[in-house]
Amino acid sequence: MNPADIARIVVGILGNIISGFMFLSPLPTFLDIWRKGTVEQYSAMPYLATLVNCMVWTLYGLPMVHPNSLLVVTINGAGCVVELIYVIIFLIYSRRTKRLKVFLLLLVEILFISSLTVLSLTLLHTVKKRSAVVGTICALFNLMMYASPLTVMKMVITTKSVEYMPFFVSLGTFGNGVAWTTYALIRFDPFIAIPNGIGLLLSVAQLILYATYYKSTKRQIAERKLAAKGQVEPTLSEVVVLANPTLPNRRKISAVSH
């Protein structure tokens, strides 16, 4: 085993650890949902996006599709289990209309990955072709997952509040992007390198927004608590968040790419 292979394994293990923490980073959010008995403004879309992303990457890492990618399979297989649990929690604590929407999207994802698996293993007869087709689909899903917080970033700028953009999710996405971009560059894999490189840039943008609006968020939360006690009027940005049903829901980015 040459030094490049050793380095790739080490970085891949590090990527597994970081991605694992990223998968678990929404736990405080779901504990809050469980305590309140409602999902409030939180959206299931980031978890659904991460779930389908993990499913396609698990397929990509299988020996009959892309050999020597065990570390891609391990973390994404674990991610499938964790994200599925999150989606089930959403199904339990959502209102009927939102629950139906989440269930239908989950069903579509299961049908999609099942069809992709059968078609790629039966119609594509070489590892090279399977890697190219499944890898391209993986890269597209990875880009969609990393782009999913864009609506939340827009809401953050509009309301000057990061309340619905959890810090540890953004930080986990940053670490995940660093690890897997490095992993893909050691033995160049464009299907992993390109989407994770873009995701790394987007996560940096999220961290910058968090640093910019952290203080104003704390101030808005404090003022809202006082307003609830009848001591002060809500600020304009709070009115936007609380009263405007047309604003995009909060979306959380877990995903993971590999």
Image: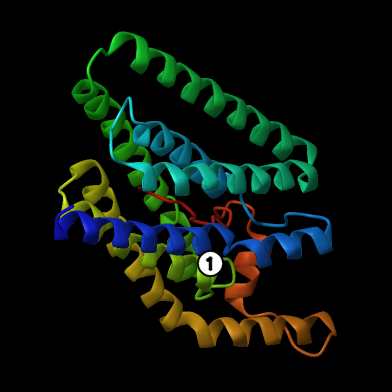
Question: Measured along the vertical axis of the image, is residue 147 above or below residue 233?
Answer: above
Say left or right for 249 vs 72: right
Which residue is rendered at x = 79% and y = 55% of the image?
Answer: 38
Protein image colouring: rainbow
Which residue is rendered at x = 38% and y = 13% of the image?
Answer: 119
Label total for image? 1
Q: Answer whether residue 223 is visible to the viewer in this image.
A: yes
Residue 136 occupies quadrant: top left
**Mark 1, residues whose alpha carbon is within 10 Å: few (<14), some, or many (≥20)?**
many
| Residue 84 or residue 126, whichever sits in front | 126
Q: Answer whether residue 44 is visible to the viewer in this image.
A: no
Q: What x and y, as percent, mark residue 20?
A: 50, 59
Instruction: Identify residue type, mark 1.
Output: Met
Say left or right for 198 vs 241: left
Q: What x and y, as percent, mark residue 177?
A: 33, 60
| Residue 6 or residue 40, whichever sits in front | 6
| Residue 105 or residue 56, whichever sits in front | 56
Q: What x and y, as percent, mark residue 93?
A: 79, 48
Residue 23 occupies quadrant: bottom right
Which residue is rendered at x = 64% and y = 56% of the image?
Answer: 42
Label 1 SS: loop
Q: Farthest residue in the front direction?
A: 1
Question: Measured along the vertical axis of the image, is residue 227 above or below residue 56?
Answer: below
| Residue 217 or residue 125, whichever sits in front | 125
Question: Measured along the vertical axis of the image, is residue 130 above or below residue 198?
Answer: above
Q: What x and y, as percent, mark residue 118?
A: 43, 14
Q: Which residue is mark 1?
A: 165
Question: Measured along the vertical axis of the image, is residue 126 above or below residue 222?
Answer: above
Which residue is rendered at x = 50% and y = 65% of the image?
Answer: 169
Say left or right for 89 vs 210: right
Residue 128 occupies quadrant: top left
